Image (spheres, rainbow, N blue to C red):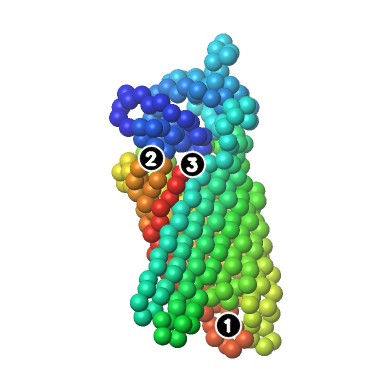
Amino acid sequence: MHKGEVLGGDIIAMYDERVEFDSDEVGIHKIKMSDIKELRTKDIMQVRFLNGSIIEGHIIIDEKYVYVREQTAITYPREHILSITPSLKSGRSLWTGEISAGLNFKSGNTESFDYYASTDLRYLITTGRFHVTYRGIYEEVRDGNTDQTITTEDNHRFTAKYDYFYSHKLYFTLPSYDLVLDEFRNIKYQTSLGVAAGYEVIDIKGMDLNVYMGPSIQRTQFINVEPGEEQNVLSPALAFGLDFEYDITSDIEYVFIYDAKVVNKQSGQFIQRIESGFDIELINDFDLALITVINNTANPIANEDGIQPQSTDVLFTVGIEYEF
């Protein structure tokens, strides 16, 4: 965008003082609220303010005030805006998100097939944001001589959380839920339920950093364990992490997500996950996603044969992402 430019399109939502905007001219983009001189909604929207009050209607925001087009006599201070979301009366879906997938196939002396699937869904409401994610990785290799097929990767991760925005920078996650299935780390399933407090540390043009921390409870069912060891383990946990986004250009975004949990020794002691990579805009709502995923467990739990999984798994994926 250029200074003084006027754009037409649909406002998806505004959280963390960033307006998510879908335009035929530039696609889906996030624009800092401070960079917007005037905003007019063509759909019925809801605006929540710092004191908890909510207004609804066709919203107009100028340099100082907010008001509803149907009631121009009543104004509200612009700096008190906490969030903007579509109203149910608008007829628009309150769901938004991204879906991406990558697929590889190799033939010859050995045949290999692998896929990576990722889904991010957000339900937009003025009090907060409900966020659901899924990450799935599967890989198998077949020997062309013996016709034997071996699965070399099969893990899935599902998360769901509700973020309540208390102020421009402070939010609370009430609650968060994780489910992990990972055969090659000897995990039949691993679930955790917790709460957290988050804070926006950096909020400048093109750069955003959020950190969080909070307690949770984790339960792990291992596929099998050594004799005398617990197969079903319950552990208190301290979860913390960060979410960093940086717009390198208007078409290239760098993302770094770090999640960690301190648990008891029987659950792995210290569990870390990193997602890092680039989203490169292709056409309209389609991006090229280049992502590296790193999973690390400080003390992996050995199986019944005493074989301990590797502490670190690294995966690089290339996929096409669709935003909606």
**Label 1 neighbour load within 10 Å: few <14, some 14-19, many 20+:** some
Q: Position of residue 51 (x, y in %)?
A: 62, 29
In the image, which is nearer the foreground, mark 1 or mark 3? 3
Q: Amino acid at mark 3?
A: Phe
In the image, which is nearer the foreground, mark 2 or mark 1? 2
Q: Earlier in the sequence, mark 2 or mark 3?
A: 2
What's the distance in space between the residues labelled 2 and 3, CA to CA?
Answer: 10 Å
- Residue 22's disc is none
Residue picked out by circle 1: 302
Residue 75, placed above or below residue 298: above
Residue picked out by circle 3: 324
Q: Position of residue 20 (x, y in %)?
A: 46, 36
Q: Residue at x 56, y 18 (%)?
A: 68
Residue 198, placed above or below residue 264: above
Q: Earlier in the sequence, mark 2 or mark 1?
A: 2
Secondary element type, mark 1: loop
Residue picked out by circle 2: 284
**Marks 1 and 3 close (CB-CB < 8 Å):** no
Secondary element type, mark 3: loop
Q: Amino acid at mark 2?
A: Asn
Q: Position of residue 322 (x, y in %)?
A: 44, 47
The quarter of the rendered structure image containing the N terminus is: top left
Residue 88, placed above or below residue 210: above
Secondary element type, mark 2: loop
Query: Does residue 281 appear anywhere in the picture?
Result: yes
> Front-most of 291 and 15?
291
**Label 2 neighbour load within 10 Å: few <14, some 14-19, many 20+:** some
Query: Does residue 82 appear anywhere in the picture?
Result: no
Q: Quadrant of residue 205?
A: top left
Q: Amino acid at mark 1?
A: Ala
Q: Residue at x 46, y 44 (%)?
A: 323
